[in-house]
Structure formats: structure tokens, C-alpha cells
Image: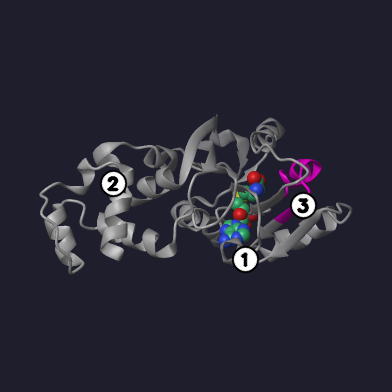
Amino acid sequence: MRKRQRLGQHFLISQTVAKKIAEAARITKKDVVLEIGTGRGILVPLLCEKAKKVISIEADSVLYQDAKKRFSGIANLALRNGDGFKTDEKFSIFVSNLPYSKSRKAMEWLIQKKFSGAIVMVQKEFYEKLVAKGKNRKAISVLVNYSSEIEKIINVKKTNFNPPPKVDSVVLQLKRKKTISKELVQTTNKLFSYKRKNLKNIFKQFGKKIESDKRLEELSSEEIINIAKQVLR
Ligand code: SAH
């Protein structure tokens, strides 16, 4: 029970949804696909069919061993056991039915990588946070929108999983525009802890000066990232 929660183990059971995910990823025989969270492997054969190579990482060693047995006949598949978010593997396409509790951390990790496209399944609430506008934006919304174009592919009802999670999911696609440094991620997060202060006071927190009484929430995502770059310098 605890492991299931910690690792966000809700396995997709719908072949229809699995096929839509694999198709939306637009994988070609030139692509190296990284999947985080092999699980019971519903996506694995579909990805391997289309890709040059698939690297699929699973934190749970029991699931990893099962997958190794089941998929031993697939030549372009590399299965790994461990924390996927610690990998240095290079990839062009990222696919993941993300553990919900780690959505934000996973996105922060992804936008620091040089991928071309990503298909991720997130909780509906997290998707809404990512595409929120104005005052409702969080640091993660600003960071992801700055780094990538976000497009919703499909809604996925919780009944498509075993065990079903408490909420529905959304499959979304990211097309990378820019890679973001770790420092920029950290600084943007810090800026948002001063969200209600005006720019003059925010700059003061970083030992810098600016004459502006605008608030962060009045700025566009690009402008907020530029502020983060300025206080970083
Ligand atoms: N892709 C599968 C599994 C989704 S459930 C499917 O669609 O059915 C999420 C999976 O991610 C679980 O198997 C869980 O054990 C695994 N997982 C959670 N955190 C992980 C991490 N940091 N690195 C690798 N796998 C992880």
C-alpha cells in the first residue's frame, strides 16, 4: 500500500489510450525514447515498434524484474531499475505516465533536458495549473510555458487505471522551445515566494535595485523569466 502511493502506481489498462499516447508521441526510427515508470509495461511494445531505441526506467525492482522477463525478446529495449529522474541518458522523446506526487519535480527536471517532444500523463488539476493564466499562475506554469508549447491530447477517466486514482488525468504534449537552467528554475521558484510583493521589494530581497511597483502576477511569463535572469546576474 505505501509503496503504491509513494511511487504513484496506477497502471493504465486501456489499450486504446495506450495507442493514442504512442501515436501522439510521433516517434520515428531515428528517435531514442525515454520512458520513466515502466510499470506493467503497457506502453513498452508500442514505443519499441516505432522507435530506434527505448530506455524504460522503473523504480520498483519487482516490476523491473517482471518486465525483464516479459520483454526479453525486444532487441531495441533497454530496461533499467532505479530513479528515472537521476538518469543521464540522452533521448529525443520523453514518455511518462508520471507519478502524480512528483509532477512538478518531473516537469522541472524535463525542462532542463534537450528533448524534442514529450508526452506526459498528469492529473487534471496539475494540467489546469500548467495552463493557468494571470494571478493563478504558479512558478511551474511560467517555467513550462516558457520552455515548451503545451497541447492537450486527451482526457483520461480514472476508470482507465488499475487501481483507479482519485481523479481524472490528462495526456499532454510538450514541444520544447528552450532549455532552462537549474539556476533559473530555482530563482523562478524563489520569485514566486514573493509573488505579492512589488518588483522593487522583490529586487531588494536579491540585493538589487529597480524602480517599479508592478507585481509579478501582472507580468507575462517571458517578463517573469527575464526578471529571474536579471536577479541571477
Ligand atoms: N507506464 C505505466 C506505469 C504508470 S504508474 C503505465 O502507464 O501503466 C507509474 C510508474 O512509475 C510505477 O510503476 C512506479 O513504480 C514508477 N515510478 C515512480 N517513481 C519513479 C521514478 N522516480 N523512477 C522510475 N519509475 C518510477
Circle 2: residue type:
Glu
Give the image location of residue 205, x and y in percent. Answer: 17, 66
Per the rendered image, the range of residues in magenta is 40-55
Residue under numbered circle 2: 223
Give me the residue at 21% from left, 48% from top: 216
Q: Where does label 3 land, which residue?
A: 53
Q: Residue at x 61, y 35 (%)?
A: 160
Disc 3 residue crowd, few under 14, some 14–19, many 20+, Cα 10 Å: many
Can residue 54 be seen here? yes
Mark 1, residue position: 88
| Magenta segment includes 48 | yes
Give the secondary structure at mark 3. strand
Answer left or right for 100 relative to 208: right
Q: Residues within 10 Å of mark 1 (few under 14, many from 20)?
A: few
Q: Quadrant of the C terminus?
A: bottom left
- Say which quarter of the image contains residue 23: top right
Q: Where is ligand 1, by quadrant?
A: bottom right
- C-alpha separation, residue under disc 1 versus residue under disc 3: 16 Å
Q: Is 167 placed left or right of 20 in the picture?
A: left
In the rendered structure, the answer to whether residue 206 lies left or right of residue 21 reads left
Closer to us: mark 2 or mark 1? 2
Q: Position of residue 61 (x, y in %)?
A: 69, 65
